[in-house]
């Protein structure tokens, strides 16, 4: 066994006359103590305990044994038990290990004095005296385990090595024992010259670094992928010289690189890190501020490039890991590990034009035979006019349905109080039935139900920042929170969709011939020739859905002419939207130009149409995204086109366009604004625009794909917290793919306030089991640095799956 050989070597050198043929059951005689035998028994006891905890066994190590013997002898001399010494170079266990030339990044110690002839009762034995080697070993282990603070050391998975020293005091019949545990030792590279004092750089000091950290807390993310290898040189590049000048603003500031090998984090042994508090591997000589700026060849371009040193000779860069060290006033203030965050800037997110189709689902169940549609209500309003419901009722007549019963379920949103909400629900249902009655349908049976829309509210906040906060609250608790003025404003986009009435119309017969896809194009042309607006709109709606279902070719949507009459403007607008949806990939620029002209022409006929005005603003966003100079600000002449554009988009809230669609326009407006103001060096308004992007992301009902695009945008903008916030609901619900999960893991490692450490480990475990190879690639170049395996729980999960 490795530990036995090691201790025999050490103890044999130190106590050559004490070797004997005693056994583990032999009574201990301090006059003739077998140090090797007692060490061997104690290590067996320690490792049996660690095996019960699922930990690796400890192996004996010479330097640790020397440090342990040193402390045992010190305690015997002082006739007391202590883990410290007076001598400066030997104060702590770590100091003593370094004194004996050990390179362990983590070390700790347990010290004890055993009264060998006392009547001490073992907790696990009926014997009253630890007389044998085995009993004394078990006694020491039990004393260690009973000390809660020290038991943590015994079960620390960072420890792989152990050294034990004994110093008997024959006069007092005391046996002083010292046990030193340590991590795997660091192995120096032969072709590198190490600085004994880390180039005189001081370890991290909170007082020295606090202003820097408060100002530049985002540097670990920002500079996570800015080291480059050019030949055998390590180069740091950043596109903004001004930022670097702000960071390195003191004379003793510097940058340095810490080079580590993959072998330091290999799965077949413990992490082998250099014991320096400044670096973990080979630290290159820091390059001071004055030299960095003097040798910057990109100063004219207002960029920054710095050569930070050479890779040691004979080393393969594919086996190396790098960390950037930011030094302030000769103190290490930031250690930046490599991490490829994969951020991506965008100018537009899924611009879709508004289509004015009938508000009918057309999902007809031939068994239950009913039609459904939804009527929205504004906040606190209940009046509904026949004109608002006429298109749907016309479609009923068009399809010649025989109505048997009308069922109205009226909902209110959850804010306010239950009694007022109940009255509001009843009035809404009665308003709907009154409007239907004015349309003069045949007399039919009616049924009214009223509810506060709790299910709808909880469904609408899925994927939002409020989901986790509310899911464990009672209805009364949620209502109390929602009714607060500030939060009600923030929740309005989620509450608005809950104010509605669902109408279900049961029918006795359905004429399926009117819905046959192949007959729709000819019926559409006939309805236009007959100037039957409602009929043509219903058929156009059915054709569109047939195209989406693959039952018709897209060409049918563009066949025939649509008259330029006011009542037919919605049909022409829909064609514009169809062309954007189905033809955008072909000649997109010229297509958008044509669509813009068509929209302007339609507005000349019907300037108040909400759908056309929506599409006008959407097309305008397309132009602005392509050319940031499309809109201008002329302060001298008080011209602010972006501001006017913003007001035009907000006017769409007063139309029948769904709020979330308007929110998507405003989301895109602010995405473009952020770049627009950046180009103008107007950073105040740029930051405001980014905050608005965050606001509207949560109100735009984005799906997972869209959310992922926005998360990458936030990563690019160094808003890592925001990216984690919008991705987290999908992770929690299990709605993700490999790319989504790996990106989430690479960024949430920076956001412990949002993703607690234990939760992060759980996600790592899920990813490792679900995605295997993709998970392993996460910790290979150009992904996350293997330095992240310094966290032993991360390493454990990695090594279980990626050996």
Image (spheres, grey):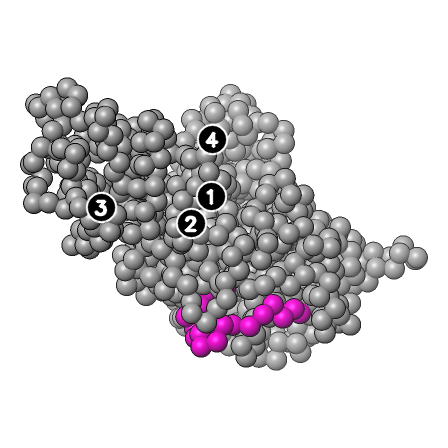
In x, y percent, where is residue 736? 40, 56
The residue carrying mark 4 is 452
Decide which of tag 3 and tag 4 comes sooner along the chain: 3
Judge whether residue 224 can be spotted in this image. Answer: no
Decide which of tag 2 and tag 4 comes sooner along the chain: 2
Q: Nearer the viewer, mark 3 or mark 4?
A: 3
Asked if residue 114 is positioned above or below residue 23 in the image, the reply reads above
Density class for disc 2 (Cα within 10 Å; few <14, some 14-19, many ≥20) is some
Circle 3/circle 1 CB separation < 8 Å: no
Decide which of tag 2 and tag 1 comes sooner along the chain: 1
The residue carrying mark 1 is 89
Q: CA distance from mark 3 to mark 4?
A: 85 Å
Q: CA distance from mark 3 to mark 2?
A: 23 Å
Q: Quadrant of the N terminus?
A: bottom left
Residue 474: name its quadrant.
Answer: top left
Query: Residue lying furthest right in this view?
Result: 636
The residue carrying mark 3 is 15
Decide which of tag 1 and tag 4 comes sooner along the chain: 1
């Amino acid at each position: 066994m490795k530990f036995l050989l090691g201790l025999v070597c050490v103890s044999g050198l130190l106590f050559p006359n004490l070797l004997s043929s005693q056994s583990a059951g032999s009574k201990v005689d301090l006059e003739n103590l077998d140090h090797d035998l007692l060490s061997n028994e104690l290590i067996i006891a320690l490792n049996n305990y660690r095996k019960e905890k699922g930990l690796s066994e400890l192996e004996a190590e010479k330097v640790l044994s020397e440090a342990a013997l040193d402390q045992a002898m010190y305690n015997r001399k002082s006739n007391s038990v202590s883990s410290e010494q007076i001598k400066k170079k030997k104060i702590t266990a770590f100091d003593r290990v370094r004194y004996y030339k050990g390179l362990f990044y983590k070390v700790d110690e347990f010290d004890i004095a055993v009264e060998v002839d006392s009547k001490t009762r073992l907790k696990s034995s009926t014997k009253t005296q630890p007389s044998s080697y085995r009993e004394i070993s078990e006694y020491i282990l039990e004393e260690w385990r009973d000390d809660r603070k020290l038991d943590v050391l015994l079960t620390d998975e960072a420890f792989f090595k152990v050294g034990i020293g004994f110093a008997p005091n024959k006069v007092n019949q005391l046996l002083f024992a010292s046990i030193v545990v340590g991590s795997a030792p660091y192995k120096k590279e032969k072709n590198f010259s190490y600085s004994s004092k880390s180039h005189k750089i001081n370890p991290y000091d909170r007082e020295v670094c606090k202003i820097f950290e408060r100002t530049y807390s985002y540097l670990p993310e920002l500079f996570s992928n800015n080291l480059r290898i050019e030949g055998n040189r390590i180069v740091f590049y950043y596109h903004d010289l001004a930022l670097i000048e702000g960071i390195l603003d003191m004379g003793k500031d510097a940058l340095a690189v810490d080079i580590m090998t993959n072998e330091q984090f290999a799965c077949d042994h413990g992490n082998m890190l250099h014991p320096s508090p400044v670096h973990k591997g080979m630290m290159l000589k820091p390059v001071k501020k004055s030299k960095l700026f003097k040798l910057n060849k990109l100063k004219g371009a207002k960029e920054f490039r710095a050569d930070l040193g050479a890779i040691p000779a004979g080393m393969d860069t594919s086996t190396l890991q790098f960390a950037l060290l930011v030094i302030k006033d000769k103190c290490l203030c930031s250690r930046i590990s490599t991490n490829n965050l994969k951020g991506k800037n965008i100018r537009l997110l899924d611009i879709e034009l508004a289509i004015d189709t009938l508000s009918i689902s057309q999902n007809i169940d031939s068994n239950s035979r009913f039609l459904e549609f939804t009527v929205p209500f504004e906040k606190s309003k209940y009046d509904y006019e026949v004109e608002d419901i006429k298109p749907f009722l016309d479609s009923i007549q068009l399809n010649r349905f025989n109505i048997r019963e009308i069922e109205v379920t009226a909902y209110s949103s959850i804010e306010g109080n239950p009694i007022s909400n109940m009255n509001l629900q009843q009035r809404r249902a009665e308003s709907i039935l009154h409007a239907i009655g004015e349309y003069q349908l045949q007399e039919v049976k009616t049924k009214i139900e009223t509810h506060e829309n709790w299910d709808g509210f909880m469904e609408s906040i899925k994927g939002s920042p409020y989901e986790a906060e509310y899911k464990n609250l009672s209805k009364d608790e949620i209502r109390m929170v929602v009714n607060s003025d500030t939060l009600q404003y923030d929740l309005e986009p989620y509450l608005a969709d809950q104010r509605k009435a669902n109408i279900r119309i049961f029918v006795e017969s359905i004429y399926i011939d009117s819905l046959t896809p192949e007959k729709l194009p000819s019926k559409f042309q006939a309805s236009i020739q007959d100037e039957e607006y409602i009929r043509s709109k219903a058929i156009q709606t059915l054709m569109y859905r047939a195209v989406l279902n693959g039952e018709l070719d897209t060409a049918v949507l563009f066949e025939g002419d649509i008259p330029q009459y006011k009542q037919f403007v919605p049909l022409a607008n829909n064609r514009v939207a169809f062309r954007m949806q189905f033809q955008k990939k072909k000649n997109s620029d010229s297509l958008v130009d044509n669509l813009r002209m068509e929209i302007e022409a339609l507005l000349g006929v019907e300037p108040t149409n909400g759908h056309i005005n929506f599409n006008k603003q959407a097309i305008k966003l397309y132009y602005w995204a392509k050319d940031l100079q499309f809109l201008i600000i002329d302060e001298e002449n008080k011209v602010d086109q972006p501001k006017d554009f913003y007001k035009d988009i907000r006017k769409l809230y007063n139309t029948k366009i769904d709020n979330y669609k308007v929110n998507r326009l405003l989301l895109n407006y602010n995405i473009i604004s952020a770049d627009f103001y950046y180009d103008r060096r107007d950073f105040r308004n740029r930051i405001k625009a980014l905050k608005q992007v965050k606001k509207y992301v949560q109100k735009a009902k984005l799906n997972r794909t869209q959310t992922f695009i926005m998360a990458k945008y936030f990563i690019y903008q160094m808003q890592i917290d925001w990216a984690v916030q919008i991705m987290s609901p999908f992770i929690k619900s299990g709605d993700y793919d490999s790319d989504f999960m790996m990106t989430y893991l690479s960024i949430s490692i920076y956001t412990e306030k949002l993703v607690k450490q234990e939760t992060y480990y759980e996600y790592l475990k899920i990813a490792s089991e679900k995605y295997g190879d993709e998970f392993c690639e996460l910790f290979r170049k150009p992904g996350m640095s293997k330095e992240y395996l310094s966290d032993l729980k991360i390493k454990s999960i990695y090594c279980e799956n990626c050996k």
